[in-house]
Image (cartoon, rainbow, N blue to C red):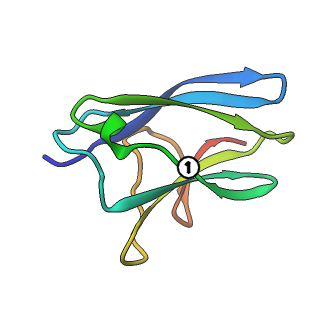
Amino acid sequence: LGYLLAVSNLKKAENGYSFLITNYGLNAPRCFSFFIVTAEGEKALDFSIDALAQFGQKEFSVETGGNFLALKIKHKNCERFIKLANDIPFENGENIICR
């Protein structure tokens, strides 16, 4: 039960990437903050968590000049991170989407 998050539909654009986050679980991950990590640094994602309610999806676009893209999902009250359901590298709390 709870949440089960996965990324898909990664697309390379001229100035960055776009991708989709899908929640295959029954509840939204309300106690977590989302961050995009690129070669330039880390940036918080500001969006309504209701978009990731049961079977919800949210598309994101990220501008970056580099090839590194990761998603960090951190618990708001402790140093706990979510690993995505995808079979992708998970290092130091970062789900590495591409490098």
Q: Amino acid at mark 1?
A: Leu
In percent of width and height, residue 3 lies at: 25, 46
The quarter of the picture where residue 33 lies is bottom left
- Name the side, left or right, on which 8 lies relative to 3: right
- The image quadrant where one finds the C terminus is top right
In percent of width and height, residue 80 lies at: 39, 70
Identify the residue at horizontal 26%, vertical 37% (top origin): 53
Badge 1 is on which residue? 45
- Name the side, left or right, on which 64 lies relative to 81: right
Within 10 Å of disc 1 (Cα), the crowding (few <14, some 14-19, many 20+) is some
Identify the residue at horizontal 40%, vertical 43% (top origin): 48
Q: Nearer the viewer, residue 56 or 12?
A: 56
Q: Nearer the viewer, residue 36 or 96?
A: 36
Most extreme residue toward the bottom, as rendered? 78
What SS does tag 1 mark? loop
The quarter of the picture where residue 97 lies is top right
Instruction: Please state the total of marks drawn on the protein image.
Output: 1
Q: Nearer the viewer, residue 22 or 96?
A: 22
Identify the residue at horizontal 51%, vertical 63% (top origin): 93
- Name the side, left or right, on which 67 lies relative to 7: right
Above/below status of 28 relative to 42: above
Above/below status of 84 relative to 77: above
- Name the side, left or right, on which 37 lies relative to 28: right
In percent of width and height, residue 79 lies at: 43, 76
In percent of width and height, residue 85 lies at: 36, 41
Above/below status of 99 relative to 29: above
Identify the residue at horizontal 84%, vertical 22% (top origin): 14
